[in-house]
Amino acid sequence: MSNGIPCPGCLDTRSRVLETRMVVEGLRRRRLCTGCGQRWTTVELSAAAPVPVVAPVAACVASPAERGGPRKQRH
Ligand SMILES: [Zn+2]
């Protein structure tokens, strides 16, 4: 299964994921290159991590800190 992450050894993108583990930063994967057999680890930052947000009811004023940030809405 291709996932587009090139091997640091031969830059082949056909790597296999040996192990996926949840860490604080996101998802940590151990990968095995099917081309040269190199193993390495990647950490994927998870933007979808559940973050508790407590918003005040009258929060109608847009704060500058929110500008440009990732905005996700679920329905
Ligand atoms: Zn490789």
Image: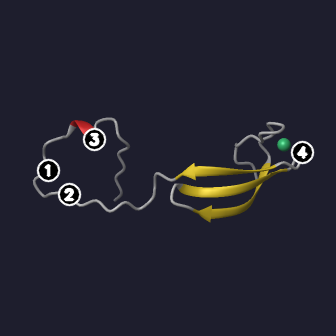
The CA span between labels 2 and 3 is: 13 Å
Crowding at dot 3, Cα within 10 Å, few <14 / some 14-19 / many 20+, comes out as few
The residue wearing badge 1 is 59
Q: Nearer the viewer, mark 1 or mark 4?
A: 4
Q: Residue furthest right?
A: 36
Q: Secondary structure at mark 3?
A: helix
Q: Earlier in the sequence, mark 3 or mark 1?
A: 1
Identify the residue at image location x=32%, y=62%: 52
The residue wearing badge 3 is 66
Q: Earlier in the sequence, mark 1 or mark 4?
A: 4
Tag 1 and tag 2, C-beta contact below 8 Å: yes
User: Cβ(mark 4) to ligand 1 < 8 Å?
Assistant: yes
The CA span between labels 3 and 1 is: 12 Å
Residue type, numbered disc 1: Ala
Residue 36 image label: 4
Tag 2 and tag 4, C-beta contact below 8 Å: no
Q: Earlier in the sequence, mark 2 or mark 4?
A: 4
Residue 61 is drawn in which quadrant?
top left
Give x and y (percent) for residue 23.
56, 61
The residue wearing badge 2 is 55
Ligand 1 appears in which quadrant?
Answer: top right
Numbered marks: total: 4
Q: Secondary structure at mark 1?
A: loop
Looking at the image, residue 28 lies above or below residue 12: below
